[in-house]
Amino acid sequence: MNIGAVCRGMANMGLSRLRLVGDMSHLDEGKIKMMGLHAYGIYEEAGRFETLSEALKDTVLASGITRRRGKNRKRLSRLPEDLADHASSFADGNIALVFGNEQNGLNDEELAACSEACHIPTHPDNPSLNLSHAVQILCYAFYRESIGEKTGSCTAVDMKTVDGLADTVEATLQDSGYYDKPDRFRTRSFFRDIFARASLTKREADHLEKVFQKLRSLNKR
């Protein structure tokens, strides 16, 4: 029923591309259609993926919507309107709003697959939002931004490129002997999050790749 309500909320705000992650064989499509009303087509055309990382490979920005903070979670979290404003600076590319399931939300690993986090401020006495309500709030923020004036845009690289650059940095650090003991600071994730938030252009990403590749070559000498 939540998926149906999500489809309806998306349609209300002009969004139409839904991606579902995991085993969806148990879904009751009758209930989805009942809750989605005229937005059932969004569910019918939704992309299906086994893993979140696979679903996000072609995105230039992937924001995990979560209220939970912690040591192994994103250091920074935007408000919905701030996220929509930031997303408007991208000239093109896929932008993902990532929501967990109704019961548990996004776990640490799922949030780590995103480039950044976003939270919806709620009253501390009852902070947990229904999934479809949270989706509606984010969709509304993006719709409002879409009908406003734009202040400039850039073409950012996708998450696949960001992950490759983070891999290069980690390999360079390994070759240099930086990891003289087990990495307790999640260094690769640290750099990956910085690169993702920076919205790197292809030229910038290529330059960084060359810098670290050269450092690897010097280390090996």
Image (spheres, rainbow, N blue to C red):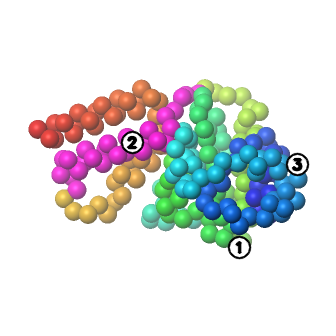
* The residue positioned farthest toward the bottom in the image shown: 125
Residue shown at the point (60%, 30%) measured from the top left:
92
Q: Main secondary structure of the magenta part?
A: helix
Question: What residue is disc 2 on?
Answer: 164
Position above or below: 90 against 2: above
Which span is picked out in magenta? 153-179
Q: Earlier in the sequence, mark 2 or mark 3?
A: 3
Q: Position of residue 107 (x, y in %)?
A: 54, 65
Amino acid marked by disc 1 = Asp
Amino acid type, residue under disc 3 in the picture = His
Depth check, mark 2 against mark 1: the one in front is: 2
- Is residue 9 toward the left or the right of residue 158 in the image? right
Q: Is 137 positioned to the left or the right of 208 in the image?
A: right
Which residue position holds label 3?
Answer: 38
Q: Give the mark, 2 or 1, whose residue is nearer the N terminus.
A: 1
Which residue matches tag 1? Answer: 125
At mark 1, the secondary structure is: loop
Residue 58 is a magenta residue: no
